[in-house]
């Protein structure tokens, strides 16, 4: 039993190491939630032809917009992780 | 006829490149070399390879077909592929690190090591194989479609010509996969994707100009005359369906054996992270390709003949362009978009079978060499299976095809949740996986809850995992105590 307790402890320590600072977790989660809202949850509310933007129906314009925004947000997460890696290397 | 000859010549040239890619003997002397290119592919090759996995003939023909028959609902593919990459960003690089360190070549390998259970490896492998065969068949139908439309008017029986073209091209593709391994589809993917980009850009830019005068005028006509095609409506494909199918497909994308094969062939985990950022720009084409389906609805006659919607893109090409050589290049692109991914799919399924079904389960005494050889020979078996199924039982395949994504996504707890939750137990995941897949089919045939079947399946799956996990603390402790993967200090 003592042994299992030991592994329970070490496992949780390693998990927190992976996630690193609280700030990183929050930032990543927030960015991911924004992507989910834009790409999925917003769908019923943008399901309309008007207003026409760039001569496109609004629904299609919205999808195209998030097609551009999502990789940019992913890139942001990549930047956060990369900076953290550099900090750790120091 | 010019179109058909152009197509045949280019396809044969590309197949030759596939054989040439494996001219060195190392390409096939171990399972790691053969199935994932020795884990040595750089960023650009991964970009093209994963691109080749995802932008298949089914993408081009299937999405324009959906656009033609469903209108705006077809655009579920846009948030689907867009969202798949941030999800992959969190999962793939971590799996890659484990895989590189412990010489794993499939996701089933990873599940086996993570849970120290051969049963879950076999289960993940079988899930992959069962849902992949109908997916390979979708690629096959792309080839038949090309030969039929390209050969229209030149042959008495274009369908027979299509079947002949299908068999010849798939035997050749199986041959190059057997010979060169992943290097064949990787290098031919460069040509295929080059053609895809050029041809799709040409089509996307020129079709509205040729048929309507400009993109703006085309949209204007669409809004004025066919507004019903541009928004979602209540019914089978309402916004709930749109949301659930996009989300589930995004989660499932990198669970597909062929997509993970591409990812594991990467040289480093960072290449995967970078690709998760840059690959989505590939998707911009996808948006416009889907719209071509709506254009097809606007300009082509609405026929009810079977399979017409599935090749609507080819009819649109035939309707818009009149030069045989230009048509030939476009048909070639679609043909290659079915052959190159089919090669990766067959390879992935063969490796799953040889490694996770045969070696892990049925013949544990198998040597490394015979495992490599079995995987390579199994390429022909998988190809033959797909051909026989596709040609003899096209109707029975439909349910499997429809439920493919819903089925594949059920391995998410085994592959992704297990990365972040160390106290996740094998038994709970196995029960969840089986329960999830069972519910997908129950919902498809009996319950008919609204939305995507995979969504309800995954809900059942996760509920089972969460409820049952607490019952297996003993098993979890045993696993944590002896697991090399989980107790790796350097990770």
Image (cartoon, coloured by chain):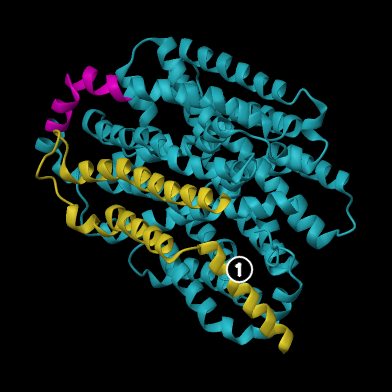
In yellow, which chain? A
Residue pushed farthest bottom? Answer: A1
Is residue A21 visible from the viewing direction of this image?
yes
Residue drawn at (71%, 75%) of the image: B479
Query: Mark 1, chain letter?
Result: A
* SS label for mark 1: helix
Number of numbered discs present? Answer: 1
Vertical placement of B334 versus B90: above or below? above
Is residue A41 within the magenta segment? no
x, y percent for residue B354 = 77, 50
Vertical placement of B433 versus A72: above or below? below
Which quadrant of the figure has residue B445?
Answer: bottom left
Residue drawn at (77%, 22%) of the image: B23
Residue pushed farthest front? Answer: A90
Which quadrant of the figure has residue A54?
Answer: top left
Q: For chain B, what colour was chosen?
A: cyan
x, y percent for residue B315 = 36, 26
Question: Taking A82 as reference, is B371 left or right?
Answer: right
B279 or B188: which is nearer to us?
A: B279
Question: Taking B242 as reference, is B420 left or right?
Answer: right
User: Badge 1 is on which residue?
Assistant: A14
State the predominant SS element of the stretch in magenta: helix
Question: Can you say which quadrant of the picture contains the C terminus of chain B?
Answer: bottom right
Region rendered in magenta: B204-220
Is residue B307 visible from the viewing direction of this image?
no
Bin the neighbour count of mark 1 within 10 Å (Cα to Cα): few under 14, some 14-19, many 20 and up.
Answer: some
Question: Taking B156 as reference, is B385 left or right?
Answer: right
Residue drawn at (52%, 34%) of the image: B47
Is residue B212 within the magenta segment? yes
B229 or B123: which is nearer to us?
A: B123
x, y percent for residue B297 = 25, 35
């Amino acid at each position: 039993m003592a042994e299992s307790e030991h592994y329970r402890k070490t496992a949780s320590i390693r998990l927190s190491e992976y996630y690193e600072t609280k700030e990183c977790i929050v930032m990543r989660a927030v960015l991911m939630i924004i992507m989910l809202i834009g790409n999925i949850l917003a769908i019923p509310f943008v399901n309309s032809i008007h207003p026409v933007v760039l001569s496109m129906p609004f629904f299609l314009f919205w999808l195209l917009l998030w097609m551009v925004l999502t990789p940019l947000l992913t890139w942001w997460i990549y930047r956060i992780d990369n900076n953290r890696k550099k900090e750790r290397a120091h | 006829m010019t179109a058909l000859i152009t197509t045949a010549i280019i396809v044969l040239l590309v197949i030759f490149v596939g054989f040439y890619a494996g001219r060195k003997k190392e390409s096939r002397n171990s399972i790691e070399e053969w199935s994932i290119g020795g884990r040595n592919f750089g960023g650009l090759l991964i970009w093209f390879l994963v691109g080749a996995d995802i932008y298949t003939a089914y993408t081009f023909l299937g999405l324009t077909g959906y656009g033609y028959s469903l209108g705006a609902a077809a655009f579920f593919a846009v948030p689907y592929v867009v969202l798949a990459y941030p999800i992959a960003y969190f999962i793939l690089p971590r799996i890659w690190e484990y895989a590189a360190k412990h010489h794993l070549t499939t996701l089933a390998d990873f599940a086996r090591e993570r849970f120290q259970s051969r049963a879950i490896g076999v289960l993940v492998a079988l899930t992959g194989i069962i849902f992949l065969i109908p997916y390979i068949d979708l690629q096959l139908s792309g080839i038949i479609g090309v030969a039929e439309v390209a050969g229209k008017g030149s042959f008495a029986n274009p369908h027979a010509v299509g079947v002949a073209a299908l068999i010849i091209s798939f035997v050749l593709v199986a041959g190059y996969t057997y010979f060169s391994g992943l290097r064949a589809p990787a290098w031919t993917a460069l040509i295929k994707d080059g053609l895809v980009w050029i041809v799709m850009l040409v089509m996307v830019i020129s079709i509205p100009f040729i048929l309507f005068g400009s993109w703006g005028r085309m949209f204007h006509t669409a809004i004025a005359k066919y507004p019903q095609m541009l928004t979602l409506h209540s019914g089978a494909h309402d916004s709930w369906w749109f949301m659930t199918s996009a989300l589930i497909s995004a989660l499932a994308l990198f669970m597909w054996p062929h997509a993970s094969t591409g990812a594991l062939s990467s040289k480093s985990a960072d290449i995967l992270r970078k690709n998760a950022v840059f690959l989505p720009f590939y998707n911009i084409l996808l948006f416009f390709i889907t719209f071509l389906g709506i254009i097809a609805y606007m300009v082509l006659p609405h026929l009810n003949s079977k399979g017409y919607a599935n090749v609507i893109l080819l009819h649109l090409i035939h309707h818009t362009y009149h030069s045989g050589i230009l048509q030939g290049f476009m048909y070639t692109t679609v043909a290659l978009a079915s052959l190159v991914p089919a090669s990766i799919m067959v390879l992935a399924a063969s490796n799953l079978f040889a490694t996770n079904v045969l070696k892990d389960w049925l013949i544990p005494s198998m040597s490394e060499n015979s495992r490599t050889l079995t995987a390579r020979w199994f390429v022909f078996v998988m190809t033959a299976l797909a051909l026989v199924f596709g040609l003899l039982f096209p109707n029975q395949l439909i349910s499997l095809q429809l439920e493919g994504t819903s089925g594949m996504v059920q391995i998410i707890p085994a592959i992704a949740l297990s990365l972040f939750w160390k106290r996740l137990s094998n038994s709970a995941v196995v029960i969840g996986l089986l329960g999830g897949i069972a519910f997908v089919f129950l919902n498809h045939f009996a319950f008919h809850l609204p939305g995507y079947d995979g969504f309800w399946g995954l809900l059942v799956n996760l509920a089972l995992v969460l409820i049952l996990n607490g019952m297996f603390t003993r098993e979890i402790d045993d696993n944590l105590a002896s697991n090399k993967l989980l107790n790796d200090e350097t990770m």
